[in-house]
């Protein structure tokens, strides 16, 4: 019975002497290895070895079984036809009646298919199937390890965030198959810019991340960034097309810009965003707003992280008035931060900080709800048509939760979406017009109105303006400020008013400080006015008192 069982089992069974000489193999062994019994009896099993086991593997095997214990492992072996296979094997000593080890018995299963499936799964979990590059999760692991090594060796790690410019246009106009080929080629070119030990990963979409290890100097990162820009300056021949694909790159360095993968990636992303703002096809190193001008205090960074919980933010409101009817059309919510340690900090300083540390969405979410609530109270107190204007920073456009956050803020406060104006900057739109269009459409579908703030300072083209579902333009206060003395500025203001009219958009002027400016704007046909000449931003209480009685 025992002999029959051994003969008939699917597993490979092999019995050797203590010196390794094979005395018996079963038909399962013959089938799995491809060697007939007569070719292997009297030999040692070395012929099954595939080459490179990890050092010490066989030493450990022998030590274990000679000490009377079983050894179990997956062996990488070679069949008679040369094929590599994986064998899950248990080798056990057999003792004679005196308790002495006389033989070893090895039973093995061919687990090649199972291993292949496991590897496939592992690849799928860690690699991007289109380009074969590591995906986000493997990138995190690698970056984490790179940081630990750099910490021990006192070296730098550079994280470069690479984003293809205008990729969506290729995808939409030439189809996804073409888009895929561009991504594959982009991956190939990026790989070519780095050493084999560095990492190129695809985060998804048209976003790639390069990790350079073991740097002594930031210059090396700069060289790679230039090399990438240079590599992408060659056209992409894809089928019948010769495509021009540029990239924008943001670089963050360990340890200066962050000590963990998340903050390095976020800051490289932010630097990339700044590169796009500056006109694409370029690279930027991350620069903290803290290093700029007077804001050198690192404690400010710590302070702003806690400012929301500590209720240090508040809102003031500046009315936008239609001078023909002397009617407040809207009130614009403006954020204020009063820190007990640092005093009042202007939004132009702290908003970049919030963008940097990823808190902008949280703070903006709070601010929107607060503003909707306070404006709603004013509407109910006798100003039912009063609109709220609310600023969105360009950075928030990259937040996939933006539309959802705004929708739920509207729902939760019961605010009529038709009375909300969202103010966006040109940068938010020109950075990634394709993505911005989708967001703007989704916002318009909520029923809110959209206006372009600081108009005239960015690079939006006529075509873009007509393309976006906008409702109004707000002329940047710098032009208003200059227009009395500077002929150029006056011409720009006049042109914007004409442009808006021709595109069927409303036009407003901000930062109007005196009567002369006011008169000039009215002459030009701009009647929506905001600025100190009418009123400075007011607290909610002041505003309640200042609004004309219902
Ligand atoms: P902005 O949207 O262009 O806001 C108008 C700015 O002009 C405000 O500065 C306002 O106080 C100021 N201003 C009002 N009247 C006059 C005037 O007669 N002359 C001059 N020269 N300026 C006047 P503020 O409050 O310091 O805000 C600066 C910027 O910070 C805002 O520019 C806006 O881009 C940003 N900001 C403010 N609150 C928020 C917010 O809640 N979210 C976001 N994302 N950005 C905000
Ligand atoms: Ca504004
Ligand atoms: Ca503005």
Image (cartoon, rainbow, N blue to C red):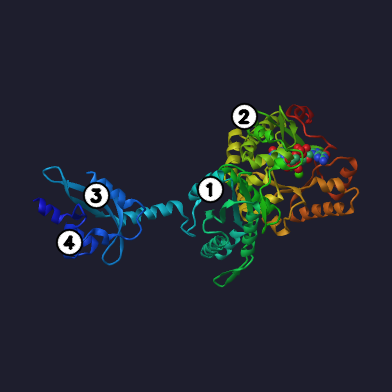
Q: Is residue 533 above or below residue 63?
A: above
Instruction: Give the left or right position of residue 139, taking residue 325 as reference.
Output: left
Residue that carries the numbered disc 2 in the rendered image: 309
Q: Residue furthest left?
A: 1
Q: Can residue 467 be spotted in the picture?
A: yes
CB atoms of marks 3 and 1 within 8 Å: no
Residue that carries the numbered disc 4 in the rendered image: 41
Q: Nearer the viewer, mark 2 or mark 1?
A: 1
Instruction: Give the left or right position of residue 487, taking residue 45 as reference.
Output: right
Residue shown at the point (86%, 40%) measured from the top left: 513
Q: Nearer the viewer, residue 124 or 506?
A: 124
Q: Is residue 419 above or below residue 341?
A: below
Mark 3, other Cα within 10 Å: few <14 / some 14–19 / many ≥20: some
Residue shown at the point (90%, 43%) measured from the top left: 516
Residue that carries the numbered disc 3 in the rendered image: 90
Residue that carries the numbered disc 1 in the rendered image: 146
Ligand 1 within 8 A of label 2's CB? no
């Amino acid at each position: 019975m025992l002999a029959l069982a051994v003969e008939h089992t699917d597993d490979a069974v092999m019995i050797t002497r203590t010196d390794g000489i094979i005395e018996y193999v079963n038909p399962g062994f013959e089938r799995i290895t491809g060697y007939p019994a007569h070719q292997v009896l009297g030999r040692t099993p070395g012929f099954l070895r595939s080459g490179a086991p990890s050092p010490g593997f066989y030493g450990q095997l022998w030590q274990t079984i000679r000490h009377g214990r079983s050894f179990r492992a997956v062996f990488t072996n070679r069949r008679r036809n040369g094929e590599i296979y994986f064998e899950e094997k248990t080798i056990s000593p057999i003792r004679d009646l005196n308790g002495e080890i006389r033989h070893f018995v090895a039973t093995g299963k061919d687990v090649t298919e199972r291993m292949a499936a496991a590897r496939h799964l592992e690849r799928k979990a860690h690699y991007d199937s289109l380009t074969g590059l590591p995906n986000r999760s493997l990138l995190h692991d690698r970056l984490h390890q790179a940081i630990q090594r750099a910490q021990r060796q006192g070296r730098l790690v550079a994280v470069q965030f690479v984003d293809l410019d205008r990729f969506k246009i290729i995808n939409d106009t030439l189809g996804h198959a073409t888009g895929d080929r561009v991504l594959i080629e982009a991956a190939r070119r990026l790989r070519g810019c780095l050493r084999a030990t560095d990492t190129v990963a695809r985060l998804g979409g048209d976003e790639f991340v390069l990790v350079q290890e073991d740097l002594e100097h930031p210059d090396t990162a700069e060289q790679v960034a230039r090399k990438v820009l240079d590599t992408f300056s060659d056209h992409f021949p894809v089928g019948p097309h010769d495509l021009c694909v540029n990239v924008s790159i943001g670089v963050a360095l360990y340890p200066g810009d962050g000590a963990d993968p998340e903050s390095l990636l976020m800051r490289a992303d932010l630097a990339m965003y700044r590169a796009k703002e500056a006109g694409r096809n370029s690279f930027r190193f991350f620069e903290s707003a803290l290093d700029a001008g007077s804001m050198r205090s690192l404690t400010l960074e710590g302070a702003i992280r806690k400012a929301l919980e500590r209720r240090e933010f508040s809102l003031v409101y500046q009315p936008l008035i239609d001078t023909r009817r002397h009617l407040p059309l809207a009130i614009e919510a403006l954020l204020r931060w009063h820190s007990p340690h640092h005093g009042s900090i202007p939004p132009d300083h702290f908003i970049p900080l919030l963008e940097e540390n990823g808190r902008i969405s949280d703070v903006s979410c709070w601010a929107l709800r607060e503003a909707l609530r306070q404006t709603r109270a004013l509407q109910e107190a006798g100003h039912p048509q009063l609109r709220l204007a609310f600023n969105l920073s360009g950075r928030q456009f990259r937040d996939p939760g933006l539309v959802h956050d705004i929708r739920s803020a509207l729902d939760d406060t019961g605010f009529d979406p038709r009375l909300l104006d969202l103010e966006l900057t040109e940068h938010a739109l020109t950075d990634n017009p394709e993505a911005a269009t989708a967001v703007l459409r989704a916002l318009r579908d909520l029923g809110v109105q959209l206006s372009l703030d600081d108009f005239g300072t960015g690079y939006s083209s006529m075509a873009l303006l007509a393309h976006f579902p906008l409702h109004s333009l707000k002329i940047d206060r710098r032009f208003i400020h200059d227009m009395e003395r500077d002929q150029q500025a006056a011409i720009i203001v006049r042109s914007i008013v004409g442009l808006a009219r021709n595109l069927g958009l409303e036009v407003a002027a901000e930062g109007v400080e005196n009567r002369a400016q006011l008169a000039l704007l009215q002459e030009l046909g701009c009647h929506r006015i905001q600025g100190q000449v009418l009123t400075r931003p007011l607290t909610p209480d002041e505003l309640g008192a200042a609004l004309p009685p219902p």
